[in-house]
Amino acid sequence: MSDGEQAGMTLSGAAIIVQALVDQGVEVIFGYPGGAVLPIYDALFAQNNIRHILVRQEGGAVHAAEGYARSTGRPGVVLVTSGPGATNAVTGLTDALMDSIPVVCLTGQVATHMIGNDAFQEADTVGITRPCTKHNYLVKDTNDLGRVMHEAFYVATHGRPGPVVVDLPKDVCIDQGHYEKPDLDNIQHKTYHPRVDGEEDRIAEAVELIARARQPIFYTGGGLINSGPEACAALVEFVNMTGHPITSTLMGLGAFPASDHKFLGMLGMHGTYEANNAMHDCDVMICLAARFDDRVTGRLDAFSPNSKKIHVDIDPSSINKNVRADLAIVGDVGRVLQRMIECWRERGHQPDEAASKAWWTRIQQWRSRDCLSFEQGNEIIKPQYAIQRLYELTKDRDVYITTEVGQHQMWAAQFYRFEEPNRWMTSGGLGTMGYGLPAAVGVQIGHPESLVIDIAGEASFMMNIQELSTARQQGLPLKIFILNNQWMGMVRQWQELLHGSRYSESYVDALPDFIKLADSFGATGLVVDKPGDLDDAIKTMIDTDGLVIVDVRVAKEENCFPMVPSGAAHNEMILSQDQANGERPSVTDDGLALV
Amino acid sequence: MTDLSELQRKHTIAVLVDNEPGVLARVIGLFSGRGYNIESLTVAEVDVANNRSRITVVTSGNEMIIEQIKAQLDRLVPVHSVVDLTEEGPSVERELALIKVVGAAEERIESLRIADIFRARAVDSTLESFVFEVTGNSGKINAFIDLMKPLGLTEISRTGVVAIARGETSM
Ligand SMILES: Cc1ncc(C[n+]2csc(CCOP(=O)(O)OP(=O)(O)O)c2C)c(N)n1
Ligand SMILES: [Mg+2]
């Protein structure tokens, strides 16, 4: 026996799994039991270090872990059984992959000698999840468990974060094996060594480019949130030093305070007029940890045609994928920003006052279009107004917002203004309806004292509505703020604007009575349909202890503007319903083919 | 900006991977999932002690696609290194093929003569057939196959391309 082995211990596989989680500092896991994971549930039963949150469907477990991860900066952990447990987790894993959320998902598997025999509740989990995880493992020997568990956390959290699956055959969990806690601060992966420091000469070159720019813009993404609060603080510092305007993707909201006048709001399909026009007309684009998603760029060949593009990303495959970068820097955005700040200082750069003034004058003209304006009458609550009031009445609190997917999500992004990172949880890349409620469960578990609100659409809410039971069991005081337009609003909007108002299957019929529904889950239900009553409803929601569902009856056929129709360029936005009804560039067949 | 008319080029890429279960599926899944071409792909363990395999893949695409392919390969967790042999200077490419030719009389003699010119060896023979082993770059093998077609070619088995950089540097 070597020294190393003496230092370790012999445990059952299930005990090794739990011990590895404890050694990783995991406090909570989200899961659902079943035959293949019973040994692990047994090991969980025997300890008090890790809290298990029982969800009501495995998809909910992964979204909860995502919400937990995104709001705390720590990886989310999931435990599900083999077969249907694992397949139910697939949507959440894909969601986490698209949005780069660190999740470790443990899946049960049939015993090793049964793999491949179509055993009861067998699924080829590593095969199914290979394209929807950052990496996955099938553990065949109990002695490998410790190493694989720690590697899984390493891979999920280093470089561009993402979901990792560890598939655990039942016999591997039952057998005895050797476990030793590794030196977690000095883990070196055999092959995976993401680059974190950007190349110095490129950073210097970027700083020169930024200093000489006359119409620059910062375009920032979710990678800043992943990089952490220090990265966001560095962003604020650098943007302030330069005085340049900044816009953010959906995923990056909160990295830079929305109240700062330099913030132009979100860009992209439902971004602001000023952000999209500034992107279109800029001469230097500083893309920080964003990935030129098609929702952001609009028509690629018309995207920001005259700019030099600087692209900072930790993932080399994000660079030159959709848009060619003139200057690419591979590294952690926080570290790169830190170096940019130092470099800017060392060289004694000052913002070019004259150029800056001219640029801001143009931006001010775009801004003065007031592209998010809407008319709120006395009769019907406009969805925009509902979010605006929600924001005003909650902004001074310790608040976290999750959303579902649809118009309400875009209005939330437009009208809820985030001052800090990690406060905004939404499904950006995959656009998963049903994300918001379980994500809110995860957020509230991570922040028991905070106000956690799921801004929901009534259709999305129905997709993971079973998680109300999870919230009830855990006594979570979630607030579910439903913008109830009785339509799959975003689908209806596209059908109106792009498919000749043929509303095929987009009406949400036979909705439940949300008050009674709340009642049956031991929650408080509120309904509001008059603008004058909205503030009271929101205040009641905040002041009511426990789970609250607010059914906000909003204008049914309101559309979300501005909108860059699919296949259009940034400077071809539709700004209002009037414009949508009247003369506007028609959408080409190529545009129609885009999602 | 993507220019679809941009020149499609063939690239030979060598990938050194940890020889763990599923690693080939990861590479192939990457190509199919992202819609990249695979013209040929070979894989074998090359370092038993360190448990490493080498995958050689011949693919084609415009410059941006090739760059994406390499970046995507490189971020797979079990990948040690990725080298674009087409881009990194001169390299040697070889392929081996086994080719069955069935025939009699004149054609049989003619196939032997051509095999000789191509330095192909007969590795199996009956009175009515040969199996030729031919090595070279893919162009040479294609040429040999074309010539064998009228002479009774009935079956082909090819290894796909393996390649290595010329000179003293190693990946
Ligand atoms: C799982 C899933 N299925 C389908 C869609 C397509 N989709 C996008 S938005 C939307 C409608 C959402 O309706 P609702 O939740 O009521 O939100 P609203 O747009 O009305 O605010 C649909 C069906 C999706 N994003 N996710
Ligand atoms: Mg709706």
Image: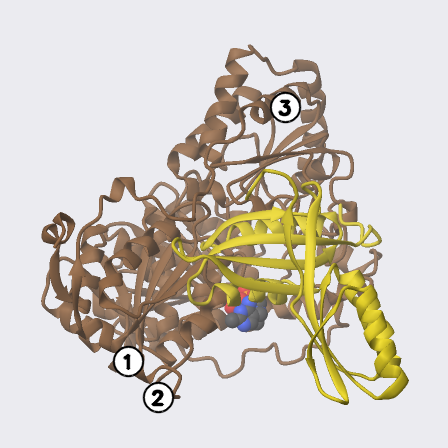
Please state if A102 lies on the left or on the right of A42 as rendered.
right
Marker disc for residue A111 = 1
Residue placed at 38% from the left, 52% from the top? A155
Compared to residue B44, the image places residue A449 above or below, namely above
Sequence-wise, which precedes: disc 3 or disc 1? Answer: 1
Q: Where is residue A371 in the image (x, y as percent from the top left)?
A: 66, 45
Compared to residue A435, the image places residue A102 above or below, namely above
Marker disc for residue A119 = 2
Disc 1/disc 2 C-alpha distance (Å): 9 Å
Local SS, label 3: helix
Marker disc for residue A210 = 3
Q: Which chain, by letter, is brown? A: A
Q: Where is residue A471 in the image (x, y as percent from the top left)?
A: 28, 67
* Quarter of the rendering occupied by the C terminus of chain A: bottom right
Which amino acid does the dot numbered 2 rest on? Ala
Sequence-wise, which precedes: disc 2 or disc 3? Answer: 2
Q: How crowded is mark 3: few (under 14 residues within 10 Å), some or many (20 or more)?
A: many
